[in-house]
């Protein structure tokens, strides 16, 4: 696969990973709060109380990033892709750090760690691919 194909696939993966929970949180905030990532895990209930406004806003703001990732995947314009990846890192890195500093006893810490580290690694790899693709067009 070419660098452009990797970028497009990676950006679409970012959009999907952001977009699914974003739509869920924006449209069905109570369900998101009590069912993310799954109903039997419900990680967000470990951080009460439920706040519908906050959950909806989180969903809508996250949906913005998903839309930007889709647009970047379509255009593959170097600066837009770089800005999108850096914006995503501005969410994922502090999110990872916060959760590592505030582990919740009895939670799925291993699964949470993987779900937070994988996007950071993906974004850093995509930044490198984006740079290489710019240096070697085509």
Image (cartoon, helix red, strand yellow):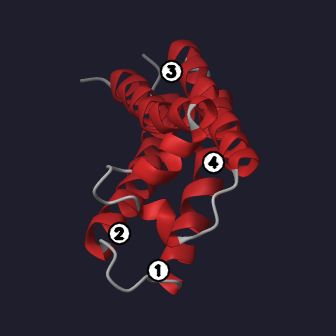
Q: Does any portion of residue 78 appear in the rendered image? A: no
For the N terminus, which image quadrant?
top left
Can you identify the residue that label 2 sits on?
A: 113
Residue under label 3, please give it: 73
What's the CA distance linking mark 3 and mark 2? 27 Å
| Residue at image point 52% right, 51% down | 33
* Left or right: 124, with 28 as reference point: left
Residue nearest the viewer, comparing 28 with 84: 28
**Would residue 126 be found to the left or right of residue 98 on screen?**
left
Q: Residues within 10 Å of mark 2 (few under 14, many from 20)?
A: some
On screen, residue 11 above or below 138 = below
Instruction: Establish if 52 lies above or below 2.
Output: below
Q: Of callouts 1 and 4, which one flags the residue occurring earlier in the amino acid sequence? A: 4
The tally of labels here is 4
Percent position of residue 91, x then y: 62, 55
Q: Tag 2, which secondary structure?
A: helix
When the figure is inspected, residue 89 is found, relative to residue 108, above or below; the finding is: above
Q: Which residue is mark 1?
A: 100
Query: What residue is disc 4 on?
Result: 86
Q: Nearer the viewer, residue 114 or 11?
A: 114
Badge 1 element: helix
């Amino acid at each position: 696969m070419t660098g452009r194909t990797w970028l497009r696939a990676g950006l679409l993966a970012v959009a999907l990973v952001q977009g699914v929970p974003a739509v869920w949180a924006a449209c069905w905030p109570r369900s998101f709060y009590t069912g993310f990532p799954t109903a039997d895990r419900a990680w967000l209930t470990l951080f009460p109380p439920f706040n519908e406004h906050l959950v909806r806003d989180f969903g809508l703001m996250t949906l913005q990033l998903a839309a930007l990732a889709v647009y970047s995947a379509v255009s593959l314009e170097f600066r837009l892709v770089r800005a999108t990846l850096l914006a995503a890192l501005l969410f994922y890195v502090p999110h990872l750090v916060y959760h590592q500093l505030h582990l919740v006893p009895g939670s799925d810490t291993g699964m949470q760690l993987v779900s937070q580290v994988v996007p950071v690694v993906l974004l850093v790899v995509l930044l490198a691919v984006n740079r290489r693709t710019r240096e070697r067009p085509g």
